Image (spheres, grey):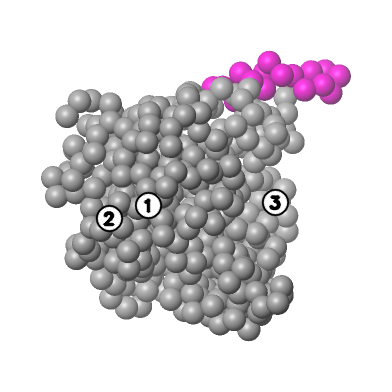
Amino acid sequence: MATPSPSVPLLQMQRISKQFPGVRALDDVSFDLERGEVHVLLGENGAGKSTLMKILSGACGRDAGEILIDGRAVALQSPRDAQALGISTIYQEFNLVPHLSAAANIFLGREPLHGAGVINRRTLLAGAGALLRGLGTRIDPAARVGDLSVAEQQMVEVAKALSIDARILIMDEPTSALTESEIDELFAAIARLTARGVAVIYISHRMEELARVGRRATVMRDGRTVATRALPCPIPELVRLMANRDIAHHFPPPTRTRGVPILQIERLSRPPKLHDVSFTLHRGEILGVAGLLGAGRTELARAIFGADQPDGGCVRLEGRPLRLRAPSDAIRAGIGLVPEDRKRHGFVPGQSVAANLALPQLRRLCRGGVIDRARERSLARRWIDELRIKTAGPSARVLTLSGGNQQKVVLGKWLAAGADVLIVDEPTRGIDVAAKMEIYQLLDRLAGRGAGILMISSELPEVLGMSDRILVMHQGRLQAVLDAREATQERVLHAALGLAS
Ligand SMILES: Nc1ncnc2c1ncn2[C@@H]1O[C@H](COP(=O)(O)OP(=O)(O)OP(=O)(O)O)[C@@H](O)[C@H]1O
Ligand SMILES: [Mg+2]
């Protein structure tokens, strides 16, 4: 085979179109990729980024357009075709098999064999172990994937992609579930790959990291590519290209007033993840919860929501102790939870957008034991509008929505239910910049109406910008409670690392 001329891009996607029922996901999109570059793909939720990448990875067919690698047209009709061409993907929604080990997932379908066709477990574990360590993680290759945290699963996905000798690596929001230090590890891994000539297509909603990782950025809007820019490029310019309007790039001004205590947590414990946590949440207050991965923040949320049974301690709502044996008890008491792992706990994928939005308030929407569909639809229309959920309509099934729009449905259902206490675990993960600002406004308004909000977040600017007070957790304990006026990134990090203030 002749070596391709270096002036020909590694990859050219030309005039790609894709139609789903009721949605034109891609409309005449062109995109190219040079050898060894990291090319960032940007766009609001539902712009078509994942669809374009699914076409490149052979997971989804196209209605029109051509794909060229080294200047030659390729068929790309299945994920197998893509793999053979050295195209490897990490999807936004994980594709791991939960009951298999990390190692088995990494080498799924490509397991090293003994002579007799039996899987060579030792080689499998050693190979996976080396990949995982190379990424800077300490994940046990024999651990069941279902027992790993979201961030750990993400790392297994990265290792899996790296295990294929990829020339083109597609990363669809790889850092949305990672902490700062894990992001550093990932970027280091990406730098090693690009130095070897691997090209990376990188999708992210975290604007602050783009220039750290990318050489160029292409912006998509409503199924079209609108511009390609060299990086670094001013963020407001990129945001304007994405949204086609100016976006207020700041947090709502602090005008809320703190009311009476609504939720009191007393000595809540669930070893080994949660030890003796006590605090009070007031009406009208947004209480941020910061901490490193594994600090016990999600466990705290689950215990308050009745999803896990604490071994000790008490949860009081307006002074009354609650008996929380299941989430249904919490929901009845007026406590809502937007969980971290929304795919697993947040929504019913096969049901409509309207049904999902109505879920926490079914009783209110029933008349004579049957759901009032008209009210359900009008409720849905309002929240589709308010959160700009991009969907073919209220009756579209949630699984047909883009990742970020699925997140908005989960958030919307609790905002619609008007919970007295709302616990949000990483509320803006996977959400585009414009919608983030809208969600901040909504949380602010909800607190302004007297709700108490517990906001768990790994994004420090968000914790600092939104909270009245900040709880910092470390190894399952409450390490510090900071007043937002005196909190800084450094002080929060200091406490998150377990250092005394
Ligand atoms: N299987 C499907 N059936 C119907 N519509 C779909 C399907 N997959 C995607 N769509 C629609 O195509 C459009 C583009 O979706 P896509 O997932 O590509 O967006 P995205 O840019 O990746 O967004 P996000 O940032 O939220 O992940 C959306 O309107 C989505 O609802
Ligand atoms: Mg997507």
Residue 446, picture quadrant: bottom left
Q: Residue furthest left?
A: 486
Q: Nearer the viewer, residue 304 or 488?
A: 304
Residue type at tag 1: Glu
- Please provide the residue range marked out in magenta: 114-130
Quarter of the figure that contains the C terminus: top left
On the image, the x and y values in percent for residue 325 come to 58, 42
Residue type highlighted by circle 2: Val
Q: Position of residue 462 (x, y in %)?
A: 29, 53
* Element carrying mark 1: loop
Residue ID at (56%, 82%) = 378
Mark 1 highlights which residue? 318
Q: Closer to the N terminus: mark 3 or mark 2?
A: 3
Disc 3 versus disc 2: nearer the observer: 2
* Residue at the image position 19 percent from the left and 38 percent from the top: 490
Closer to the N terminus: mark 1 or mark 2? Answer: 2
**Disc 3 secondary structure class:** helix
Q: Residue furthest front?
A: 320
Q: Residue at x 29, y 72 (%)?
A: 247
Check disc 3: other Cα within 10 Å, few if <14, some if 14-19, many if 20+. some
Separation of residues labelled 3 and 2 (CA atoms): 56 Å
Q: CA distance from mark 1 to mark 3?
A: 54 Å
x and y percentages locating residue 428 in the rendered image: 40, 56
Tell me if residue 347 can be seen.
Answer: yes
Label 1 with label 2: CB-CB less than 8 Å: yes
Which residue has dot 2 on it?
260
Badge number at residue 336 = none
Residue 122 on the magenta segment: yes
Label 1, label 2: how many angstroms apart (C-alpha)?
Answer: 9 Å
Circle 2 sits in a helix, a strand or a loop, which is it?
A: loop
